[in-house]
């Protein structure tokens, strides 16, 4: 299945290879493969088009936010773990400096300037908006076969947020055992997934817990891992391109992110199948997937009952879900997802989205080969 606009991709590829790269080599000399990847990534994402300046014309002019945004994209591509490391690399690498747009004869912005700019980008959701536009441009008019949904642990260097005792839920009253008496009506409270049905996307995103806390999850080998931080939920297309993502508290169950993610993905691409593991096994999620015109393929969770196996054709399609695991691994190993040096949901999400943005551009370029 063709999941990319190959004509547009090839045209952009030729422009970079035949026009931009010779000019850069003539100006700064030979480029390493990583710097070539930075050039292609910046040309693909065009993050400067989404940067807005907050300077009102009074006082000292601020540093160009477009250059700083390009530098953070380069940081994700090069796998640099800290902003100080990025500044040091810019200071000694003239080619990278010119690629990001910094002048060769002017002093680089200070580390505090980089940090303030990153806080502005996080508050404005710069990386999220750029990624959404890139996905819509490249995959928006294509038919995607499978969307693989999964959550992954994100360790953060901050203490878990203290729970507000005043806002703590009321103690759970034990249910009365046995059959109800004649004429007795027992209240059946709806579950969290049922409460999500029918709500708009903005309200669903607002209700998700976002503070840092402690979470636990079983890995592929069945062992339980615990961590302090967050949980990143990603929808990945069968061509390996991350389509949408959101960040929640580490303790939140994966299934609560399914509806918001599905609605975000539906606004960007058109897909046929939703692939999810047994953590998402719910009749509510299956019904929601069908309401979007999709076919849900969710691994059945027997819950002390008899497991319902996939048919042969469904089992073959479910193998496509390995794309989600590869996306999680590439984000952590190659694009900074394992090294979180910022605090707060907005900044952590921005750091991860810069990595997802670079990963998306790289995966789109891989489709050419």
Image: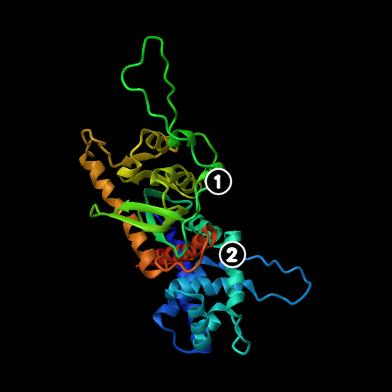
- So how many labels did they put on this image? 2
Asked whether, in this view, residue 358 is left or right of residue 333, the answer is right
Front one among 199 and 95: 199
Q: Secondary structure at mark 2?
A: helix
Q: Which residue is mark 2?
A: 121
How far across and how far down the image is residue 241, in percent? 40, 58
Q: Residue at x 32, y 22 (%)?
A: 177
The image shows residue 220, relative to residue 24, as above or below, that is above
Q: Secondary structure at mark 1?
A: helix
Which quadrant does the C terminus fall into? Answer: bottom left
Asked whether, in this view, residue 369 is left or right of residue 115, the answer is left
Nearest-to-viewer mark from 2 and 1: 1
The image shows residue 48, relative to residue 154, as above or below, that is below
Q: Residue at x 37, y 36 (%)?
A: 286
Q: Which residue is mark 1?
A: 206
CB of mark 2 within 8 Å of CB of mark 1?
Answer: no
Number of residues whose C-alpha sits closer than 10 Å to that of mark 1, classed few (under 14), some (14–19) or many (20 or more): few
Asked whether, in this view, residue 80 is left or right of residue 108, the answer is left
Q: Disc 2 and disc 1: Cα gap in Å? A: 20 Å
Q: Residue at x 27, y 46 (%)?
A: 317
The image shows residue 238, relative to residue 93, as above or below, that is above
How far across and how far down the image is residue 135, in percent? 48, 57
- Is the image coloured rainbow, by chain, by secondary structure, or in one colour? rainbow
Tell me, for residue 327, which label it has, or none: none
How far across and how far down the image is residue 132, in percent? 52, 56
Asked whether, in this view, residue 324 is left or right of residue 39, the answer is left
Mark 2 / mark 1, whichever is N-terminal: 2
Which residue reaches farthest right?
A: 58
Residue 236, visible in the rendered structure: no
Q: Residue at x 31, y 46 (%)?
A: 277
Front one among 138 and 315: 315
């Amino acid at each position: 299945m063709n999941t990319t606009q190959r004509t547009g991709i090839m045209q952009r590829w030729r422009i970079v290879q035949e026009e931009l790269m010779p000019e850069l080599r003539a100006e700064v000399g030979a480029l390493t493969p990583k710097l070539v990847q930075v050039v292609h990534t910046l040309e693909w994402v065009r993050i400067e088009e989404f940067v807005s300046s907050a300077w009102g014309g009074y006082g000292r002019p601020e540093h160009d936010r477009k250059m700083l945004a390009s530098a953070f994209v380069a940081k994700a591509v090069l796998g640099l773990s800290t902003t100080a490391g990025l500044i040091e690399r810019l200071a000694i690498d003239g080619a990278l400096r010119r690629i990001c747009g910094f002048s060769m004869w002017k002093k680089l912005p200070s580390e505090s300037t980089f940090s303030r700019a990153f806080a502005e980008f996080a508050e404005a959701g710069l990386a999220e908006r750029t990624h959404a536009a890139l996905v819509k441009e490249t995959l928006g008019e294509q038919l995607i076969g499978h969307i693989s949904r999964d959550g992954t642990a994100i360790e953060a260097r901050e203490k878990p947020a203290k729970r507000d005792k005043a806002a703590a839920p009321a103690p759970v009253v034990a249910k009365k055992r046995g059959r109800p008496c004649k004429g007795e009506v027992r209240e059946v409270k709806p579950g969290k997934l049922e409460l999500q049905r029918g709500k708009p996307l903005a309200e669903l995103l607002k209700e998700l817990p976002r503070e840092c806390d402690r979470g636990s999850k079983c890995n592929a080998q069945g062992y339980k891992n615990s961590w302090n931080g967050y949980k990143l939920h990603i929808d990945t297309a069968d061509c390996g391109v991350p389509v949408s993502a959101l960040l929640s508290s580490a303790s939140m169950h994966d299934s609560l992110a399914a509806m918001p993610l599905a609605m975000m993905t539906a606004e960007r691409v058109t897909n046929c199948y939703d692939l999810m593991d047994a953590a998402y096994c719910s009749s509510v999620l299956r019904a929601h997937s069908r309401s979007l015109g999709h076919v849900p393929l969710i691994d059945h969770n027997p819950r002390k009952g008899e497991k319902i196996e996939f048919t042969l054709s469904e089992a073959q399609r479910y193998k496509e879900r390995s794309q989600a695991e590869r996306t999680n691994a590439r984000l952590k190993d190659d694009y900074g997802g394992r090294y979180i040096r910022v605090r707060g949901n907005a900044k952590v999400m921005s750091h991860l989205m810069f990595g997802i943005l670079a990963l998306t551009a790289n995966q789109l370029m891989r489709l050419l080969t």
